Amino acid sequence: MSKPKKVRNPFTNYQRRDEYGAWLGYKLASFDRKKNKASLTIILRKDHTSSAGRVHGGVISALFDATCGLAVFTTMGPEDFCSTVELKVNYFSPIEIGDQLICQAEVVFRGNRLCSVQAFIRHKGKRAPVAMASATFYVVKKK
């Protein structure tokens, strides 16, 4: 088995480690500047659950936010930065500890300052989504 290829991060405003993402455990699956798409994967753990013993919706929202943000990165220059303005999530079906999920996001509109993204989360290898999101990001370009 080969090691994942180390990729240089070209974004000067994003050189620090994503501590929250590291704790959540999501991994980069794809980043495509030509198609303005990105995807992350995650394996759900016991510490992702709420007091009701179910996977917390905040874990799914965080996965959407990170993946949608990466899709926005596909449109950005090396000195630009972005922040989430709005994130709307629809949950379709339950997910369980141990489930392997993939979140796929695509930019649907990129203006001068605003960028709109849509995303879906699916069980790895399945077609039907378990959740979907739409997000808007504010992009600041270096002058």
Image (spheres, rainbow, N blue to C red):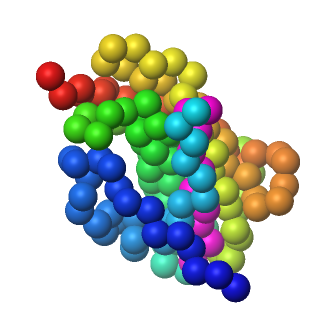
Q: Which quarter of the picture shows residue 85?
A: top left
> What residue lies at 60% left-to-right and 53% top-to-bottom?
30
Which of the pair 46/99 is nearer the observer?
99
Secondary structure mainly formed by the magenta segment: strand
Image position, residue 86 (x, y; %): 39, 30
Image position, residue 125 (x, y; %): 83, 59
Decide: is 69 above or below 30.
above
Q: Which quarter of the picture shows residue 119?
A: top right
Left or right: 39, with 100 as reference point: left
Does the image show residue 85?
no
Left or right: 96, with 34 as reference point: right
> What residue lies at 73% left-to-right and 52% top-to-bottom?
122
Left or right: 107, with 1 as reference point: left
Image position, residue 124 (x, y; %): 76, 61
> What residue lies at 57% left-to-right and 42% top-to-bottom?
32
> What residue lies at 44% left-to-right and 62% top-to-bottom?
7
Q: Which residues are magenta?
A: 35-45
Is residue 91 on the magenta stretch? no
Image position, residue 1 (x, y; %): 70, 85
Quadrant containing the C terminus is: top left
Which of the pair 142/121 is nearer the observer?
142
Is residue 37 on the magenta stretch? yes
Q: Which quarter of the picture shows residue 110?
A: top left
